[in-house]
Amino acid sequence: MQVHPELIWQFLGKFSPSDYIAILALIIALGVGAYTVRTELFMAKMATYQRVHEQLISKEVASGRRELLTRASKGLLPPLPQPDGNPEDTEAWDSINQAMAWYDTLGSYYLKRQVPRKVVMAAWYHPLTAAQDDIYRLLDHRNNLGISQPWSSLRELLTATKEHHCTCTACEAGVTKKQQLNPNIRCDCASCQETRSPETGPTGE
């Protein structure tokens, strides 16, 4: 169906200047309203992220991550706590599981888009990448102990981390993350995987 320009001009001619002003004001109001809603939604997501972030960097949770990193690679993950068990193992168990539970919480919010995903990856991409092998060791350890809690959100977060294209200078051309101070840690982001040779490892090593 073709609309003739004459009909359009006839239709527009029925409006007075005040009508156009009213329409323009309505459009501006709608735009401002949409921007306000978007800003408030982002701020709400940031507030949620901030609460989780503060827990993740707390002394107790950081201690749990440290316990995992020092124990898992050596095969020293603590056994399931027993009433007459070693208190140090019990404390390590609780500390590690608390840390991973907060990672799982972060993953849950991430998957539901209740936190800004770019902000999450900017802050936690490298720690998650550095710890992912040890986290999987812990998940296997818990499974072998008969614990059915899968921490599925944490697993999904690790998958998202692997697929993330990190643009920081440490990840350019597949170079290992120098800030981790561990030459054995390799970058597993998608962009680095593309430049990695199976025989030689990441470019630049």
Image (spheres, grey):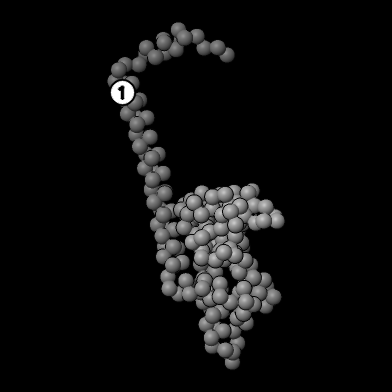
**Pointer 1 local density, CA inside 10 Å: few below 14, some 14–19, many at least 20:** few
**Secondary structure found at label 1:** helix
Say whether residue 22 is left or right of residue 81: left
The answer to whether any part of residue 35 appears in the image is yes
Q: Is residue 119 above or below residue 95?
A: above
Give the percent coordinates (x, y) of residue 110.
Answer: 52, 56
Q: Quadrant of the C terminus?
A: bottom right
User: Would you identify the image quadrant in which residue 158 lies?
Assistant: bottom right
Query: Between 205 and 179, which is closer to the camera in this rendering?
Result: 205
**Residue at screen point 39% across, 14% down:** 12
Residue 86: give x, y in percent of width and height: 57, 89
Observer-nearest of 4 and 94: 94
- The one of 15 and 188 positioned closer to us in this rendering: 188
Q: Which amino acid lies under the numbered mark 1 shown in the image of this protein?
A: Ile
Which residue is denoted by mark 1 in the rendering? 21
Q: Residue at x 56, y 61 (%)?
A: 129
* Rendered location of residue 180, percent (x, y): 51, 64
Image quadrant where residue 13 sits? top left
